[in-house]
Amino acid sequence: MLLDEIKFDSKGLIPVIAQDVADNAVLMLAWANKDAIEETIQTGFGTYFSRSRSKLWRKGEESGNRQIVKEILLDCDGDALIYKVEQVGGIACHTGHRSCFYKTLRDGSWKENSEVIKSPEVMYANHR
Amino acid sequence: MLLDEIKFDSKGLIPVIAQDVADNAVLMLAWANKDAIEETIQTGFGTYFSRSRSKLWRKGEESGNRQIVKEILLDCDGDALIYKVEQVGGIACHTGHRSCFYKTLRDGSWKENSEVIKSPEVMYANHR
């Protein structure tokens, strides 16, 4: 079975890179367990395991910014995944940035490399 | 200090996505510790921590396929990095594929999505 080729860590998790299928931008890095991957395959929506909340995380359930998963990729040693996604709303990060990777190292410190598209207040208020 | 904003896991590691600066292709996911990040910043070459060998991993030291790091990005909660790299030799994976993510889920199984550019035998023989 396809899940047998996936090597989960000691906590039953695997890192997942969410990448925008349109331009290959990396949107976030999150974690999945077996259930999250199975749900992603079944529903077609990016599903993860939230380590802070210790439960299945249906990305976008609260913000509306779901991810439509177009492809799932596995790496050579089976311990990392990519979800290639269409990012609904164009925002992956809970801060309102498109990508969670909005800090770039420049001259010895982290500088924001992109704008907030929508404030978290607005983003989450709309979908409560 | 810039390293203070990085949240390492209980083993002192953080996942690092190596992404091709030319076209945003994700090349691999590896891990770094504090020393690896400092060496990457100082030398400009992608440096990781090998979990299997438990030591600093100067990517390309054996294969010649070094990574020239053009940018380092940090995510919103400080627990994942991106190295944006120029991949020397155009090959990141020890299998000889450009990217480690050369398996795509299709019709219930993992199918190779790209060719081997150079066989591992040739790749490693040239640099021993």
Image (cartoon, coloured by chain):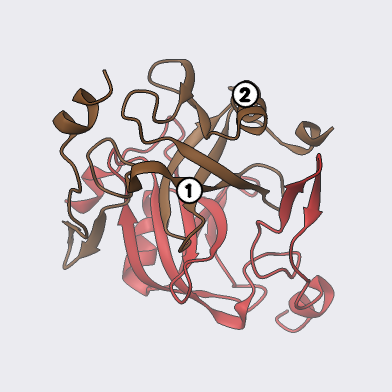
Chain colours: A red, B brown
Instruction: State whether residue A93 appears in this view.
Output: yes
Q: Chain of mark 1?
A: B
How far, Cα to Cα, is label 2 from label 1? 26 Å
Q: Tell me residue B104's x, y (percent).
A: 25, 60
Q: Residue at x 27, y 42 (%)?
A: A76
Q: Residues within 10 Å of mark 1 (few under 14, many from 20)?
A: many
Q: Tell me residue A77's x, y (percent).
A: 29, 37
Q: Tell me residue A102's x, y (percent).
A: 71, 59
Labels 2, 1: one chain: yes
Q: Considering the image in quadrants, where does the N terminus of chain B appear?
A: top right
Q: Is B10 or A111 nearer to us in this picture? A: A111
Q: How many marks?
A: 2
Q: Residue at x 75, y 75 (%)?
A: A124
The amino acid type found where label 1 is placed reads: Glu
Q: Tell me the SS state at disc 2.
A: loop
Instruction: State whether residue B100 appears in this view.
Output: no
Which numbered tag is attached to residue A38?
Answer: none
Left or right of residue A61, residue A31 in this image: left
**Label 1 near label 2: C-beta < 8 Å?**
no
Which numbered tag is attached to residue B86?
Answer: 1
Left or right of residue A98, residue A80 in this image: left
Q: Residue at x 21, y 60 (%)?
A: B113
Q: Measured along the vertical axis of the image, is residue A56 above or below residue B92?
A: below
Q: Residues within 10 Å of mark 2 (few under 14, many from 20)?
A: few
Quadrant position of residue B123: top left
